[in-house]
Image (cartoon, grey):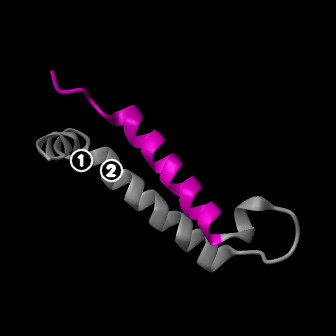
Amino acid sequence: MKDIIVFISNNRNVLIAIIIGAIAGFLNWYYFTCYWGTYPLSAECWVNCCLGAILGGLFATLLHKENE
């Protein structure tokens, strides 16, 4: 349990960015969705949420500084 708390405290900003990215992906799906066609970013809610979370995590990882 202590390892989980240490992991969360060390990666707090990245985890917050993942959550914000998932919310942004959901909002993208909700407001800008296209129910027809073959464009994969507009068809499914879970695809937008996952891609938003991945992009949020990648962006935050670029800005994340390691604690030494």
Per the picture, the main secondary structure of the magenta-coloured stretch is: helix
Q: Which residue is labeled 2 in the image?
A: 15
Amino acid at circle 2 = Leu
Foreground residue among 16 and 4: 4
- Relative side of 40 to 57, left or right: right
Q: Residue at x 50, y 65 (%)?
A: 24
* Residue extending farthest top: 68
- Relative side of 28 to 11, left or right: right
Residue 52 in the image: above or below residue 33: above
Q: From the top left corner, tell me how far across and down residue 7 is, in percent.
A: 22, 40
Q: Find the magenta span and give its range.
A: 45-68
Q: Secondary structure at mark 1?
A: helix
- Relative side of 16 to 2, left or right: right
* Residue extending farthest right: 37
Toward which corner of the image does residue 36 lie, by quadrant? bottom right
Q: Secondary structure at mark 2?
A: helix
Amino acid at circle 1 = Arg
Q: From the top left corner, tell me how far across and down residue 54 is, in percent.
A: 51, 48
Residue 50 in the image: above or below residue 60: below
For the residues bearing labels 2 and 1, Cβ distance under 8 angstroms: yes
Which numbered circle lies on residue 12? 1
Q: Residue at x 48, y 62 (%)?
A: 22
How many labels were placed on the picture? 2
Q: From the top left corner, tell me how far across and down residue 19 is, in percent.
A: 39, 59
